Image: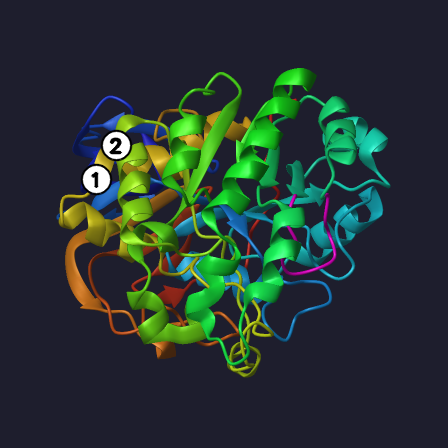
Amino acid sequence: MAHYELLIRGATVATPSAIAPADLGIRGGRIAALGDLGAASADTCIAARGLHVLPGVIDTQVHFREPGLTHKEDLESGTRAAALGGVTAIFEMPNTEPPTTTPERLADKLARARGRAWVDYAFFLGGEAGNAERLREWELLPGCCGVKVFMGASTGSLLVPDDETLARILAHGRRRVAVHAEDEERLRARKPLIPAGADAAWHPVWRDELSALRATERLLALARRCERPVHVLHVTTAEEMALLGQHKDLATVEVLVNHLTLAAPDCYQRLGSYAQQNPPVRGERHRAALWAAVADGTVDVLATDHAPHTREEKARPYPQSPSGMPGVQTLVPVMLTHVHEGRLSLQRFIDLTSAGPQRVFGIRGKGRIAVGYDADLTIVDLAAERVIEDAAQASRCGWTPFHGMRARGWPVMTIVRGQVVMRDGELCGPPRGEPVRFWP
């Protein structure tokens, strides 16, 4: 009789071939058996009838602010929010203080995460003029998920506004480069257009559609010339989606929960600067185009761009108020609400949050429920319904733009490499997160 360390019985399990009833046997942190496991025994058995077991959700764009900005977030609090939200792995961005632009700074982040991270993790290296030629070797370091480039200024000091530097970065390496595509020259030219006393509703006017489209056009031309694959982050415009759909041999595409869920002008009327992020939440025409791109396959990955700021910082007069919203803890319930309301299928949600990240970034051993893969599982109750509240957020910022939203579909258990790290809203410690592994 087979024996497992963890046995999940009676759930509806999402495998690459079907979403169907099955038992799941886990041994050594990996999936050992799948199907009707009959009389099998286990050290721990979880009765999961009525629940869905999904491949572990991977959020490939978060800002956990450590080092240097830990009054907003740190690696412990950010990964705690991830675990409570059903997220099993995160990719953290390099615009900390100091920015993650050298192997030594990458090693520092890895050391900070060890023993404190509740979920698995990897870190981006920031591309800049001073390290462009070294990125070819550094991007293969353990714990590095790739290179991130900011074409337009956002939180922090990282910025690559010119084509010459961007081309140097693209020419030195082979892994896919993740890019924040906003045209810095146009952003600087348009900022004086903001009138005195303006509020955050001006954000999509200042950082307009053409700022995004111009940067994406420049990026694609350089990537084509350098023959370097790119991943265009947080795409917000209909025009960009139409363009990116013509370059799928070269570019993969990310869309954010916020841009699919919020729309101008309503979000700025309700939330003010709490709805401010880069690139901005835009109007309904663009949101409809993002959903169409999700439906037709243009979009490869769904992420949050979890970027917390304190209430005091957000209360500054616009445009001194910082851009960014938290989101890693609310990704699953918000998107499962979209599933419930028919905007996308459960299969498409799974592809965007597990299989998609695995394909885009070359993740080893994660991204699907299959024998031999890491036992990273997001277990959800699709019938559970409750209200998202600020008070429940683990992020140090203590707020969410979705406060008051009634969500249908909630994570009830988060399992990372066979270890239950969250059950019924409670963390199960100690933190056991490890670096995500990648193919070279």
State the separation of the CA atoms marked 1 and 2: 7 Å
Report the residue marked by disc 1: 344
Which residue is painted at 64% across and 55% down in the image?
189
Residue denoted by label 2: 295
Magenta stretch: give its range. 151-160
Quarter the N terminus occupies: top left
Residue 291, above or below 140: below
Queried whether the magenta region covers residue 153, the answer comes back as yes
**Residue at x 19%, y 43% (from the top left corner):** 343
Query: Circle 2 — which element?
Result: helix
Q: Report whether residue 273 is seen.
A: yes
Task: Residue at 46% x, 64% y: name it.
Answer: 326
Q: Is residue 79 above or below residue 4?
A: below
* Number of numbered callouts drawn: 2
Horizontal arrangement in the rendering, residue 134 relative to residue 122 (left or right): right
**Residue at horizontal 48%, vertical 28%?**
252
Q: Do the residues bearing badges 1 and 2 touch, measured as CB atoms within 8 Å? A: yes
Q: Quadrant of residue 75?
A: bottom right
Q: Is residue 132 above or below residue 433?
A: above
Nearest to the observer: residue 81 or residue 398 = 398
* Relative side of 49 to 235, left or right: left
Closer-to-camera residue (324/374): 324
Q: Earlier in the sequence, mark 1 or mark 2?
A: 2
Compared across the picture, whether 150 is left or right of 281 comes to: right
